[in-house]
Image (spheres, helix red, strand yellow):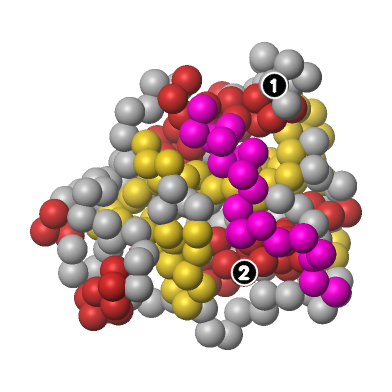
């Protein structure tokens, strides 16, 4: 079964709008309590695990304070087969606007003090940070859902937070090849890789990055972001788990 990790605005979600919550697991790990993980059964027949990275009901852990090790370890304990996640991002690439979707294919890790390993031996195979089949399914699912502003590929730069970046930092990230900026995909993807869990991300542009807001002043961290992202990821999960479409 796949795990969907909810990012921006997942704390505003009404999961019942998407399916039936069959059970909820509260996993205690060597790194503390993981957030609640719900088994969600959607009307079309897909069943996934779902967890909100930043808390439930309200934002309880902002990006820099997420306990990634607890959540990823819980995924390992529940024997999930792969992870689909959504991440709200600031747009760096000049063409990106608020509301656009990006399925990143590379990562620049500019975090400094986060723990990015469990201390087990590193994963044996390494084909880049993101799960190719997961990415492909997210792109196909977004098209199916009628999304038109979707970018297949892009580099996500991960910053340490909790503060936002300076304009100079964003300019440097742009020169380094970054298209979007966020604070959550690392160490999440490194920890998943260490446990042998493939992971793919759907990034939703919530704002233009520091110093570039003149291109689009809007900001959207509303529940709409979460419902839209979860809808796409549930379609992607159905594609990845249906026997006709391996
Ligand atoms: N910077 C860092 N993380 C973010 C941003 C941003 O502009 N927007 C959403 N997550």
Q: Position of residue 97 (x, y in %)?
A: 24, 46
**Residue at position x 69%, y 21% in the image:** 245
Spatial CA span between label 2 and label 1 = 30 Å
Sequence-wise first label, 2 or 1: 2
Q: Is residue 213 above or below residue 82?
A: below
Among the 4 quarters of the image, the one containing residue 76: bottom right
Q: Position of residue 107 (x, y in %)?
A: 50, 64
- Magenta region: 121-140
In the image, residue 138 lies in the stretch drawn in magenta: yes
- Residue behind mark 2: 187
**Residue at position x 37%, y 41% in the image:** 151
Q: Where is residue 102 in the image (x, y as percent from the top left)?
A: 41, 45
Q: Which of 106 and 209 is in front in this view?
A: 106
Q: Nearer the viewer, residue 43 or 11?
A: 43
Tag of residue 245: 1
- Whether ligand 1 has any atom under 8 Å from the Cβ at mark 2 is answered as no
**Residue at position x 23%, y 80% in the image:** 168
């Amino acid at each position: 079964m796949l795990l969907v990790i909810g990012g921006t605005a997942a704390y505003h979600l009404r999961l019942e709008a998407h399916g039936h919550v069959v059970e909820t697991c509260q996993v205690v790990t060597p790194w503390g309590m993981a957030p609640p993980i719900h088994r969600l059964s959607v009307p079309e027949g897909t069943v996934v695990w779902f967890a909100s990275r930043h808390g439930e009901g309200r934002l309880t852990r902002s990006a820099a304070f997420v306990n990634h090790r607890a959540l990823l370890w819980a995924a390992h304990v529940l024997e999930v087969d792969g992870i689909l996640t959504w991440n709200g991002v600031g747009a760096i690439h000049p063409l990106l606007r608020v509301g656009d979707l990006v399925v990143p294919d590379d990562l620049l890790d500019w975090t400094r003090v986060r723990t990015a390993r469990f201390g087990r031996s590193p994963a044996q195979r390494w084909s880049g940070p993101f799960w190719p089949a997961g990415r492909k399914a997210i792109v196909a699912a977004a098209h199916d859902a009628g999304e038109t502003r979707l970018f297949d590929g892009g580099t996500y730069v991960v910053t340490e937070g909790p503060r936002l970046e300076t304009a100079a930092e964003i300019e440097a990230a742009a020169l380094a090849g970054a298209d979007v900026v966020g604070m959550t995909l690392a160490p999440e993807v490194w920890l998943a890789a260490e446990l042998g869990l493939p992971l793919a991300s759907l990034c939703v542009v919530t704002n233009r990055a520091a110093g570039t807001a003149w291109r689009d002043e809007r900001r959207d961290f509303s529940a709409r972001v979460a419902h839209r992202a979860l809808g796409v990821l549930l379609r992607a999960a159905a594609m990845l788990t249906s026997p006709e479409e391996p």
